[in-house]
Amino acid sequence: MKREKYEPVLKNISYFIKWAEGAIVIGIVSGCIGTAFGKCVLWVSAFFQSHPWMVFLLPLSGLLVLGVYHALGEDNNRGTNMVIESIYSNTEISFATAPAVFAGTLLTHLGGGSAGREGAALQMGGSIGTQIGKWLKFDEKDKKIAVMCGMSGVFAALFGTPMAAAIFSMEVISIGVMYYAALVPCVFSAFTAAALARFWGLMPEQFAIGAVPAWSIETAIVAVGLAAGCALVSELFCIALHTTEHLYKKYLPSPVWRILSGAAIVIVLTLLTGSTRYNGSGVSLIEKCFEGEGLPWDFLIKILFTTVTLEAGFKGGEIVPTLTIGAAFGSFFAFLFGQPVGLMTACGMLGLFVGVTNCPISTLLLGFELFGYEAMPFFVLVIAVSFSFSGYYSLYASQKFIYSKTRTRARSLATCFCFARVRIIGTLVPFCVIGNSKEFPVTQKRVPIYFRNPKMSCFKEIHESTYSITIYS
């Protein structure tokens, strides 16, 4: 009787000990690899800035990226979307993913492609977590936690933001649902990796935002206006990315011609702008925005550079370019309405980040770690409004929207999967609506549900029920 009484407590203690050990191991490995990767990215970025003629070698860098991925058997690697899918499906991240994206990102930055590094961080972390989960003989559910641990670890090492990194990997998978079983492991992994990165000399990014005005109704209205603008820009960025991907694949189905064309466009754009201001991740442009040296069109041109680079097949990520676009828009907003440039730049970065990732908690923690706590009311308001206004756009096609942003009920199950993994093949399926605990069949109506692999676990329920879909109002 006593044993049964204390069994839940004993299970929790066992869980804590197991994952404290496992997460620290993953944190050490991901911290070391993330630090090495971060230092390499800094070196190749600095080399490009001192040798801008390297942009003319971007086509060669693109071919080398394709060559590395082909040699490692990663031709069909789908990047961060694949990592997200591995959490809620049976998709497995291969060991080769880590070295492939490591080399591919360095080659992209060496040639001046406009890309970040967090995509590489999430992919390397997912690969590390998967392999360590195998070595520690974790079951399938625990392997998914290990994947999130790895994601948090490399992200924390690269950005020096362990709080945001710990939550981001749990929050980004399914909007409205947090994987709380991974909380302790991700926190331990993130802080371990961040401490290692700092120990090895990879210092976190931090920005001084300057004077913060007193909180008032007037400043709140300004913050809401900025947030609404950030939401629109985030939608524009997501639409630009997905449209460019579609156009590339439609008119340039060959990966070789696609990446060569993308490289050529980046070269032409660089020559037209007359500088390397928009090449690379954009950290230097963020610094210029904080110093009041931003230009009104910076955010639009950075969107153009980034979409052309990433959708052509170059590697890296969208998050640092997102922060750059947000900083440029915030700086422009400050100039337009006579507001403090440092505060508006910081708020713009957070507004864009939450708009494209749909992760408000991670965004708030990121703001605290990058800018401090003094402007907390502004951060909270901008994040909340931008999150709400940005709708269901996302950088990641595999991200699932479980709950509505505007209602307390679950979103359409069909819609959730449409955002997650759906691709058009034209299958027509029956459809019914369930509302107020009562079923209302719609007899003569059919809805196209498009999938790639109905046997995946995330589509299993639909597949086994003869493709019947339940829609929640």
Image (cartoon, rainbow, N blue to C red):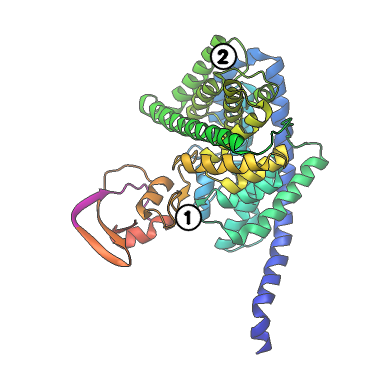
Residue 433 x, y percent position in the rendering: 28, 59
- Counting labels gives 2
Please identify the quadrant where the C terminus is shown: bottom left
Q: Label 1 belongs to which residue?
A: 89
Please tell me how crowded label 1 is: few (under 14), some (14-19), or many (20+) other residues with Cα within 10 Å: some
Mark 1 vs mark 2, CA separation in Å:
41 Å
Q: Nearer the viewer, residue 175 or 22?
A: 175
Residue at the image position 55 percent from the left and 32 percent from the top: 226
Task: Identify which amino acid the numbered label 1 is placed on.
Answer: Ser
User: With respect to residue 247, does 379 lie above or below?
Assistant: below
User: With respect to residue 62, does 36 lie above or below?
Assistant: below
Residue at the image position 39 percent from the left and 50 percent from the top: 417
Q: Residue furthest front?
A: 217
Residue 424 x, y percent position in the rendering: 32, 42
Q: Secondary structure at mark 1?
A: loop
Left or right of 445? Residue 69 is right
Q: Residue furthest bottom?
A: 1
Residue 369 picture quarter: top right
Magenta stretch in the rendered image: 443-456
Left or right of 100? Residue 457 is left
Task: Identify which amino acid the numbered label 2 is placed on.
Answer: Thr
Please tell me how crowded label 2 is: few (under 14), some (14-19), or many (20+) other residues with Cα within 10 Å: many
Residue 204 x, y percent position in the rendering: 75, 37
Please identify the quadrant where the N terminus is shown: bottom right
Q: Label 2 belongs to which residue?
A: 270
Residue 444 counted in the magenta span:
yes
Q: Residue furthest left?
A: 444
Residue 344 x, y percent position in the rendering: 63, 30
